[in-house]
Amino acid sequence: MKIHKILLFLCIPLVAFVSAHKFYVSVTNIEYNKSAKTLQITTRIFIDDFQRLLQERYDLKEELTTEKKVKEVEQMMASYIGKKLKISVNGELKTHTFLGKKYEDDVTVCYLEIIGVENVHSLEIENGILYEIEEDQQNLVHTKIGDQRKSLLLVKENDKGLLKF
């Protein structure tokens, strides 16, 4: 009986690590390039989450990292991000262009750009990425406008924020 208690005591820490909790987050960086008059945007989304979303929404059959049907996959990504990431500059909704993507470790990095931005006094950002597949999704947005850095943490219940510069 005593041996059973000792074994049970030794096994409890091992069992605790088996049920690791997954963290659901995307990170979007927005930087103003004054000389080019553009907002340069990178969005990082976990590959497995993005894969699941594209399978459910667009019936994607291929694994993202196999690089099959690259143009088709990029069109799906561009369409999805275009609907879920909305950016208004100085009160005016802007359209971003999907420039491409790459895979880094377990993350899809998407590159976007908004052209023709003369100046930035305010950014209103709405980010609904992955909320439809994960209730606990959090979307971080980091901005750099000139020397000012500001961030937002957006969640399903509060997916929009306004930053003034």
Image (cartoon, rainbow, N blue to C red):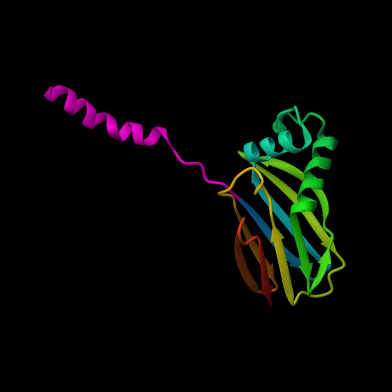
Q: Is residue 8 magenta?
A: yes
Image x and y of residue 98, in percent: 82, 50
The answer to which image quadrant residue 35 occupies is bottom right
Q: Is residue 111 magenta?
A: no
Indicate left or right for 113 with 25 as reference.
Answer: right
Residue in the image at 74% along x and 56% along y: 85
Question: Split into 4 quadrants, where in the image is the C terminus?
Answer: bottom right
Q: Residue furthest left?
A: 2
Along the line of sight, which residue is nearer the eye, 96 or 21? 21
User: Which secondary structure class fits the magenta region best?
Assistant: helix
Residue in the image at 71% along x and 29% along y: 63
Residue in the image at 77% along x and 43% along y: 77
Image x and y of residue 127, in percent: 69, 57
Residue in the image at 84% along x and 36% along y: 72
Along the line of sight, which residue is nearer the eye, 139 or 146? 139
The stretch in magenta equals 1-25
Question: Split into 4 quadrants, where in the image is the N terminus?
Answer: top left
